[in-house]
Amino acid sequence: MSIIIDMNLSPQWVGEFKIHALDAVHWSSVGKHDAADKIIINWARNNNHVVFTHDLDFGTAIALTKAEKPSIIQVRTQNVTISHLRDIVIPTIKKYAELLEKGALLVINEDKNRIRILPL
């Protein structure tokens, strides 16, 4: 599984994911910093990447279009720093990797996670 990290999350996530054997790239290295969500979604779909974001609009866009891909990982916390989230995000992504490969919306909170199979 390859992950595209949205602009609203730190590029340092790339290194953190690499430490845990997860392939990732930050959007700033492949596209314009002000790209619309639709462009990022299309890029992720065309390049077989999962979107990792703090933006709720991605889940809405996937739901409205009834798309089967790309998978979306939404972090729903106020503190999105790596030091705060790594122990929550990494195990959760690994736990649901198979479903994310097929097409899913994974919502990660500090106290619970929710996954839904696409299309919504």
Image (spheres, rainbow, N blue to C red):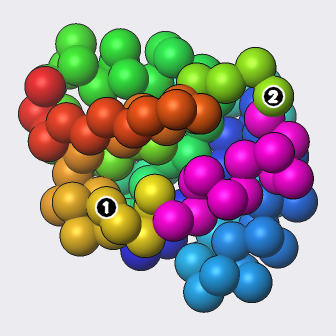
Report which quarter residue 17 is drawn in. Answer: bottom right
Amino acid type at image mark 1: Tyr
Image side of residue 26 versus residue 41, left or right: right
Secondary structure beneath disc 1? loop
- At label 1, counting other C-alpha atoms closer than 10 Å, the crowd grade (few under 14, some 14-19, many 20 or more) is few
- At label 2, counting other C-alpha atoms closer than 10 Å, the crowd grade (few under 14, some 14-19, many 20 or more) is few
Q: Position of residue 25 (x, y in %)?
A: 69, 65
> Tag 2 or tag 1, which sits nearer the N-term?
2
Q: Is residue 12 above or below residue 74?
A: below
In front here: 62 or 12?
12
Q: Which residue is mark 1?
A: 96
Q: Position of residue 72 (x, y in %)?
A: 41, 41
Q: Is residue 88 visible?
A: yes
Image side of residue 9 versus residue 107, left or right: right
Q: Is residue 90 magenta?
A: yes
Q: Residue at x 33, y 47 (%)?
A: 71
Q: Quadrant of the C terminus?
A: top left
Q: Which residue is mark 2?
A: 79
Distance from the alpha carbon under mark 1 to that under mark 2: 22 Å
